[in-house]
Amino acid sequence: MTHLHILHVDPDSTLSAHIPSATLQNEVDIEVITEQRAADAIQRLQTLDEQIDCIVSEYELPETDGLEFLERVRAEYAELPFILFTGSGSESVASEAISAGATDYVQKTAGEKQATLLLNRITNVVEQYHSRRDRDRVYQALETATEGIGILAEDNRYLYVNDAYADLYGYEQDDLIGTHWEELYPDDEAQRFHDEILPELERAGTWAGRSHGQRVTGERFPEELSLTQLDTGGHVCVVRDISQRLQRERQFETLASNLQGLVFRAENNPEWALEHVMGNVEDFIGYSATELESHEISWREIIHPDDRETVWDSVQTALEDGDKYEITYRLRDREGTTKWVIERGRGVTNSDGSIEYLEGLITDITERKRREQELEWKTKAMDEAPMGIIISNPSQDEMPITYVNNHFCEVTGYDEDDAIGRNPRFLQGPLTADDPVEKVRDAIESRTTVETDILNYRSDGTPFWNHMQIAPITDSGGDLAYFVGFQNDVTDRVESERRIEVLHRILLHNIRNELNILLGHLTELKEQQDVDPDTISGVKQPATNLLASSEKARQIEALLTSTSFEPEPVSLSTVFDRVLNQLSVSAEDVDLQLEGLSDRTVVAQEQIAAAFRELLQNAVKHSSKADQTATVTAEQESVVFSEKGIERDAIKVHVEDSNPLISELDRTRLLGDKESPVHHGSGLGLWLVNWLVTMSGGLVSYTERESGGNRVTVVLLQSGEE
């Protein structure tokens, strides 16, 4: 049954009395709302708005007439049906009413036929009104739709396109009306329509898929197209440009393929059956996406056995709370290798609120876990290191301490909370010297490494000597991030060095002076007739030896304090030029046979020449024959310098003589096999040879010559500069 709302405007209406019987007969349910005055009708119309389907008005109304009322209605409601129903009108009134926009004009007469006629007129005009309104709404919807919508006639030419459809291809709407659809597609795509798409549309009545359109500029673009066959012939086209979506899909696929992990959709059950997988899957876990999607293996089987229940419980708890979830767990890849992953996901629900499936991202964080564990180990190593460690932040005022380790607290007596936030100079005190403080300050300002001994104070006020090493730490961009300081309590060492320094002065200066006085007195005694010469020699020889040892120690001290501890490239010719210039014996006593190797460069201490000078002087000085010489030869060969068996090019320098064999004690000093008492100057010199060679990264060896005499071999690495 049709339901209509009629606004009846008439001061003496009998419409309500006639309509009910007519509506029952015509199966139309009409609600009549009656107003006697036009103004009241307008107000009622504005209040009810779209509920009114038709206005039925008398011509003669209080204070106005039906035509003026019609004019007021049309000013706001241009399409609303308006029937002038009057008993006092005329043909001219009817004509004027129709011209003014009345939908119909009906003369009032008595009887049921009149009511039926009026009802039929009302029903007809309302149906037309509703049809026109619905058509306008559909048209408005088509015009405002974001998808392109077109209607093709049976001859495949456009009857209608909305603005979105025309704009998609770069045309105006009117330009496409009457145009064949082939104008909007490149030739190869039009052929595909004829071969595949249109036959399927004819068979099934619908077709949906992707195709390629062509804009008026000739540019091809991907589109998503839906076609529906019409009963009257022709079909409806709905089209959408998917260029941006495809670009996003390609970007997502590129991102997924470069992920150290996978994107997934899975069933929410304990087996975690994966329905869809994207990403660098096979490189990640060794299984292909096909194996996972076909359920040849479930994700539960890949999860580490010890983590399966925890993963299930964590996900279900999050889903019950309606939350997204993020969990970290282990899995085993195809090779059985354990990997750490982080899974971020959410539940996708059905209309009834139940979980339909899970979707999310699983990322490989094995390397991050390794770094975290490595950082944990490093932090633990720093915490428990047998030296004090502090870290300061130079980006803040006063460069406060941000970290101290356990040993720092043990040495200084300060708790961690006492040190954090303070400048490291809080350890200084009244007797702290200015020089090391200035040295540290200059290094910090220049962002360089510094090493010094400084007097610091513990929390209880007791002083201690602190061997401090400070180094700048930069971030990945090369900017200064922190300063790290290493601290060692070297109080015992400093005090020992001071005691040794005092004894050293006594040995090298006081005793030496006393020995010179003693030797002077012995010379005077020797000139006296009543003194036994053997007795004087027995006293003089040890004193002379002791004085020689003192002089050798002084020379060695001067040498070691002037040399650099860092080996550097130096040519053999330069080394032996220094040797010959510094020899205390005649250079003619040395037979130098370098055989073309003098230009070779070796890696050695700055004072390596002193080692060769010592060997040559000993060889010449201890010669038993005046015409004997020390011979120096050299050869190049590869030698093994480490337990790992790594071979390096080296130069072997042999110093040979025909002297009596070097004693076992002196060989020990030369080879550095073990410490032994030093009895005379030659012992100190051989110790110096060993020290300079080994500190150059070289080797010293000794052999007895078959023809008699000694052969000392010095092996030095050949420089890589050649």
Image: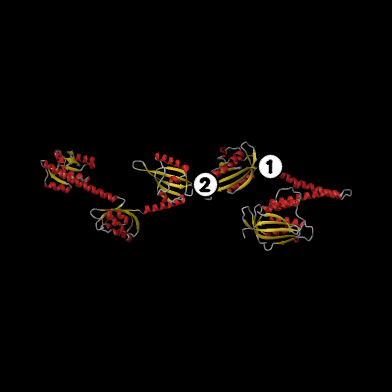
- Residue 212 relative to residue 257: left or right: left
Density class for disc 2 (Cα within 10 Å; few <14, some 14-19, many ≥20) is few
Left or right for 218, reference 416: left
Q: How is the image coloured?
A: secondary structure
Relative to 610, is 33 on the left or the right? left
Which of the labelled discs sits on residue 570, or is there none?
none
Percent across and percent down for residue 641 are 64, 54
How far apart marks 1 and 2 lie (CA) works out to 43 Å
**First in sequence: mark 1 vs mark 2:** 2
Amino acid on which the number 1 mark rests in the picture? Glu
Q: Would you identify the image quadrant in which residue 170 lies?
A: bottom left
- Comparing 183 with 291, the one in front is 291
- The numbered mark at residue 495 is 1
Give the amino acid type for the residue marked by disc 2 in the picture.
Arg
In this rendering, position of residue 395 left or right of residue 60: right
> Would residue 206 be seen by someone viewing this image from the given angle?
yes
The answer to which quarter of the image holds residue 389 is top right
Q: Secondary structure at mark 2?
A: helix
Q: Position of residue 420 (x, y in %)?
A: 56, 40
Compared with 454, 616 (above or below) is: below
Judge by depth and name the residue closer to the eye, 275 or 46: 275
Q: Nearer the viewer, residue 211 or 510?
A: 211
Of circles 1 and 2, the one toward us is: 2
Label 1 neighbour load within 10 Å: few <14, some 14-19, many 20+: few
Picture quarter with the C terminus: bottom right
Residue name at image x 23 percent, y 54 percent: 232
Q: Which residue is mark 2?
A: 371
Query: Residue 105 location in percent, x, y?
Result: 14, 46
- The answer to whether 306 is drawn above or below residue 235 in the figure is above
